[in-house]
Image (spheres, rainbow, N blue to C red):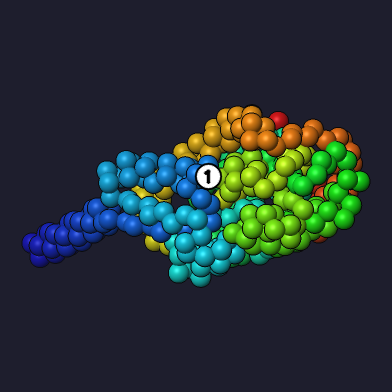
Amino acid sequence: MKRVTLLLVVFMVLGMTTALFAQGGAEAAAKPVEIKLGYIYDPSHPWHAGSQKAAEVAKELSNGRITINLYPAGQLGTEPELLEQVLLGSLDASIAGAGQVGTLYSPFNVLEMPYTFRSNDHVYEFTQSELGKSLFEGFRKKFGGRIIGASAYGVRQLTGNKAIRTPADLAGFKLRVPEQTVTMAYARAMGANPTPIAFSETYMALQQGVVDGQENPMSTINAQKFYEVQPFLNLTSHVTNATFFVMNDGIFSSFSKADQDILLKAFDAGAKLIVEILNGEDLALQDKFAKAGVTIIRPDIEAFKKATASMPKEFSGWWADEYGADFHSKIQNMK
C-alpha cells in the first residue's frame, strides 16, 4: 500500500513538473521579441528592401510577436563599427560584406577575389551550399557571429572621370575603395591607385576630385547618386559580392527553436528578394544613367581577368589551412 502511495506521489510530482515546463515553454514562445538591425545602406538600396522583407515575414510567421526594427543609412555607425557591436553583443544584428567580415576572419576573403562568381544567382547558390555553410560555421566558432541570411550585393562596376577600357587606362587613377586589404589588392592588380575613403564621404570626394572614380554595383551607384558626379560607367564586372545578415550568436541562441526557424526563414526571404531586385535593376539602371548623360563603356573583360588571375593563388593563405588551397576553385566552378 505504501509503495502504491509513493508511486502516486512520484507521478503527481512528475505531472506537475511537466506542466510547469510546458507552461514555461508556452510563455517563452509567447514572449514578444524585438531585434535591432543596423546597416549603412540607404532606404532606396536593395538591402534595405531585403531587410524590410525579413521584418515583414518574421512578423507574419510569428503572428506579430517578432519585431525587427530597422536602422538604415549608418544611423548606428559605420560598417566596421556595426559588426563590432554585433560581435560584442551591444547590437543584435547588422549587415556586413564579405570584405568586412574578412578583415576579422580571413577565409571570407576568398569571396572577394575578382571574377569568382558568375552572377548574383551564383552567389546565392553558394550561400546555400555545404561550402558556404562550412565557411559560416568557421566564423561563428571563432568570432561568435552567426550568418542568419546571405545574398548578393551586386556586380561591381567602375565609374570614373574618364573611359576605362584596359588595365593600362587605370595607371595613376585614384580609385576610391573601402579600407579593406582585399579590395585594395584587387584595385592595384587592376592597375589603379587604391584610395580608402569612408562610404559616406565618397560622393563629396568624387565631386571635389579627391579621387578619380569608385567601384560599386549599379544599385549602389544609383542609391548614392554617384552617376551625378561621374561621367563614365565602365562595365568591368570585376567582383560580384556576397553580403550577410549577421547576428550575435549568443542572442540568436537565446531564442526558442521555433523563433530561430522563423528568423532564418524571414532573412532567407529577404535574401531572395535582394537577388531579384539586383537582377532586375542592372539593365534598367544602365538606361537611366545613359539618359542622365553618363557614357557607358564596355571594357576588355579578358584583359582585366588576366590582370587579376594570380590573386587567388597569391592570397590562398587566407583560407588554405582551414578549407584547402582549392577552396576558391571549388566555389568558382560550382554548377
Number of numbered discs visible in the structure rendering: 1
Please state which amino acid type lies under the numbered disc 1.
His
Identify whether 54 is placed above or below 14: above
Give the quadrant of residue 222: top right
Q: Report whether 129 appears left or right of 304.
A: left
Residue shown at 47% from the left, 61% from the top: 75
Residue toward you, 157 or 69: 157
Residue shown at 59% from the left, 59% from the top: 200
- Residue 91: x and y in percent read 45, 65
User: Which residue has dot 1 on it?
Assistant: 45
Residue shown at 32% from the left, 51% from the top: 66
Residue 35: tell me if it is visible.
Answer: yes
- Residue 262: x and y in percent read 39, 45
Count residues near mark 1 (Cα–Cα under 10 Å), then give few for <14, some for 14-19, many for 20+.
Answer: many
- Residue 169: x and y in percent read 88, 45
- Which residue of the protein is positioned furthest toward the right in this rendering? 168
Residue toward you, 312 or 21: 312
Residue toward you, 306 or 234: 234
Q: Report whether 61 appears left or right of 123.
A: left
Identify whether 72 is placed above or below 132: below
Residue shown at 53% from the left, 42% from the top: 46
Give the quadrant of residue 319: bottom right
- Residue 104: x and y in percent read 66, 64
Where's the C terminus, which quadrant?
Answer: top right
Residue 188: tell me if it is visible.
Answer: no
Q: Report whether 86 appears left or right of 243.
A: left
Q: Report whether 108 appears left or right of 246.
A: right
- Secondary structure, mark 1, is loop
Where's the N terminus, which quadrant?
Answer: bottom left
- Which residue of the protein is positioned furthest toward the left in this rendering? 1
